[in-house]
Image (cartoon, rainbow, N blue to C red):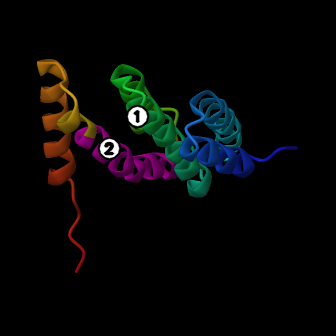
Amino acid sequence: MYQWQNLLDDGNDCFHSKNWKQAEYCYKEAAFHLDSLWAADTRNVSLLMAWICVSHNLATLFEVQNEPDLSLQHLLVPHNRMLSICNSKDSCEDTKIIAENALKVTFMPILMFSKRHPMCDTCQKSLAEFKANLESNKQVIH
């Protein structure tokens, strides 16, 4: 079986050689495999982070091709999934904690994207509210 790691590596090679369609294919296949693996093992942080990474690679791929709407979509998918898990009554506490921590990873690229590309007022307001909420929930470690 062709592993997601190989697909990610191939996608990166294609990206660097500007073979956009093949990079997209590899990244989407890697994301599919990672999504399936993580669904079977939701406490596996490494799989989750790899899936988020592949989603962000897709976002970068579309951004360099001047397709900001598709780029943003690939930034929002993992972010919205983590929000959904955090708010789900069906998710166990361990998975919710993992998702809460992952939100810090998914949010910053969206915020940076918003500085490079115009967003509607509603989206800007939502980003500002989320950022304020994230900052107010920071834990102090002594």
Stretch of the chain drawn in magenta = 92-112
Q: CA distance from mark 2 to mark 1?
A: 15 Å
Q: Is residue 85 visible?
A: no
Q: Is residue 29 magenta?
A: no
Instruction: Give the overall secondary structure of the magenta segment.
Output: helix
Local secondary structure at mark 1: helix
At horizontal 47% and vertical 52% (from top left) the residue drawn is 98
Q: Quadrant of residue 84?
A: top left
Local secondary structure at mark 2: helix
Q: Position of residue 136 (x, y in %)?
A: 14, 52
Q: Nearer the viewer, residue 139 or 120?
A: 120
Q: What residue type is disc 2 on?
A: Pro
Name above or below for residue 97 compared with residue 24. below
Q: Is residue 4 visible?
A: yes
Residue for badge 2: 109
Q: What residue type is disc 1 on?
A: Val
At horizontal 18% and vertical 43% (from top left) the residue drawn is 131
- Crowd rating for badge 1 (residues with CA inside 10 Å; few <14, some 14–19, many 20+): few
Q: Is residue 110 magenta?
A: yes
Q: If the image is split into quadrants, where does the N terminus sit?
A: top right
In screen coordinates, is 123 left or right of 82? left
Mark 2 / mark 1, whichever is N-terminal: 1
Name above or below for residue 76 compared with residue 106. above
Residue for badge 1: 64
Q: Which is in the foreground here, disc 2 or disc 1? A: 1
In screen coordinates, is 121 left or right of 40? left
Considering every residue shown, the one lying at the far bottom of the view is: 142
